[in-house]
Structure formats: C-alpha cells, structure tokens
Amino acid sequence: MNRIVAGLGAAALSLAAMGSAHARPARNIVLVHGAFADQTSWNKVALRLRRKGYRVTLVANPLTSLADDVAATRKALAAQNGPTVLVGHSWGGVVIGEAGDDPKVSALVYIAAYAPDRGESLEALSKGAPPTPGQKTLRPDARGYLAIDPAALPRVFAGDLPVREGEALAAHQMPLNGAVFGSEARIAAWHDKPSFYAISANDQMIAPEAEAWFAKRMNAQTVTLPSSHASPVSHPAEVADLIERAAR
C-alpha cells in the first residue's frame, strides 16, 4: 500500500511539475507561413520579437501537402527548448492545428487563418460560399498547383501595402498544391491549447466573417485589425503584440 501511495505521490508531483512548466512564459516563437507566400512574409514580425529577446524560428513550408507542412513544423518544434508559441498565417492555421498538440506548444496564434476542426477540410468548409475576390484570381498550373495571378496579388493579397511591397510579395509567391483543400484535419489542437486570433477586417482572400467564425468557435482571445490578408507585413507591430500576449 505504501508503495502505491508513494507512486501516486510521485505521479502527482510529476504532473504538477509539467503544469508549472507549461505555465511558464514562453520565450520561443515558431512562425508558420501560409499559401502564396514564403517565410520572408514573417520578417517584420520576427524582427520585433527578436529585439525583445524571443527566440524566433521561421518554418519553410513546402506547400506540397498537409502532411509535408506539418512535418516541417514538427521538425521546427523539436528544436525548441521549453514552452513555445506556435503561430500560423492563412493556410498555416491548418498546419498549426495539426502540429499544435506537441507538448512544448503553450499557445496557438491564428493570423487571418483557417482553423478546421477534426474531420473538416477547407473544401467542405467553403462549400456553398461564394469565392472571395482573391480566390477568383487563383490560377492552376499543369501539376494542379495554385497561385494568385501576380498582377492581382498586390491588390487582393496586400491591398494596404505600398505597391512595391505588394510586388515583392508577388515575387516571393509559392504555389499551393490544390489537393490540400480536400485534406481533412485529424487534430484540432485549439480544443486543448489557449488560442488567439487576429482577424483581418479588409481581407480579400479569406472572408473576414469566416475568420470571426473560426475565432468565436475556438473561444480565442481576438483582435480585429484594419488589414488586408497580409497583416504580418502591413501590421507587424499589432501581430507581434498579440503573439507576445500569447507568450505571457
């Protein structure tokens, strides 16, 4: 009996230690980019966070499949030491929902992002909804990969940025495998992790109403920015502030 009691006591202490470690402020930030962009879209946010002493990692998603993007994110998480805030922009929200069950992840931050529940795909979520202005500019290539018409990207993806910055984003555009829209989420880590959401009120890629619905469903702490879809580029200070709030 004493051994059982001792064992239970040790287990309780272990769980308490895990809980206190999880409650520590996070000093690690992992940033996951979305479709039609690359990791440089996080540069302004990363610079602000690094200046405040955070260890920031930018994930280079291949955008070839949900599984491949999750694997790239899990690799980045494996390199972290201690509590970590996991942040996803746009398609990156699907990725962090899958990878966010990692025990190092202390909070999730969604920036103008999709946030499917288990068993949901983007195809199913958008069924019956009219395409947004940005979605109307998507063009497939011979492999079935989608890209925004480069001439339209500065307007529909980054309408609140100077034209030159929008053109720079177009130059860094990465196509997305169209098959990912049918991929069903297996994990929805936002059920179990504190979640935060930044809605882009002037988004032309994902409907702002859909973003608000995702944020409400996950009971996220939410801010609304007067931003295009490219809020990490056009509103980096506000995005960094929300990530810091999640880290604390």
Image (cartoon, grey):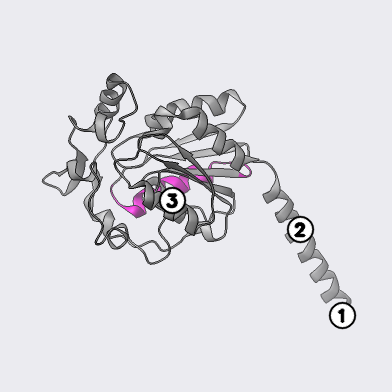
Residue linked to disc 2: 16
Q: In the picture, residue 3 is in which quadrant?
A: bottom right
Q: Given contact means CB atoms under 8 Å apart, are the residues at marks 1 and 3 in contact? A: no
**SS under mark 3:** helix
Residue linked to disc 1: 1
Q: Amino acid at mark 1?
A: Met
* Between 235 and 43, the one nearer to me in the picture: 235
Image: magenta residue range:
64-83
For the point 25% across and 45% down, the residue is: 176
Q: Position of residue 57 (x, y in %)?
A: 49, 35
For the point 32% across and 46% down, the residue is: 206
Residue linked to disc 3: 212
Number of on-image labels: 3
Q: Is residue 63 magenta?
A: no
Q: Position of residue 219 (x, y in %)?
A: 54, 56
Q: Amino acid at mark 2?
A: Ala
Q: Left or right of 66: which side holds 98? A: right
* Between 73 and 164, the one nearer to me in the picture: 164
Indicate which disc residue 236 carries. Answer: none
Name the residue at the left extreme.
142
Which tag, 1 or 3, sits closer to the chain's start?
Answer: 1
Q: Residues within 10 Å of mark 1 (few under 14, many from 20)?
A: few
* Between 141 and 212, the one nearer to me in the picture: 212
Q: Is residue 121 visible?
A: yes
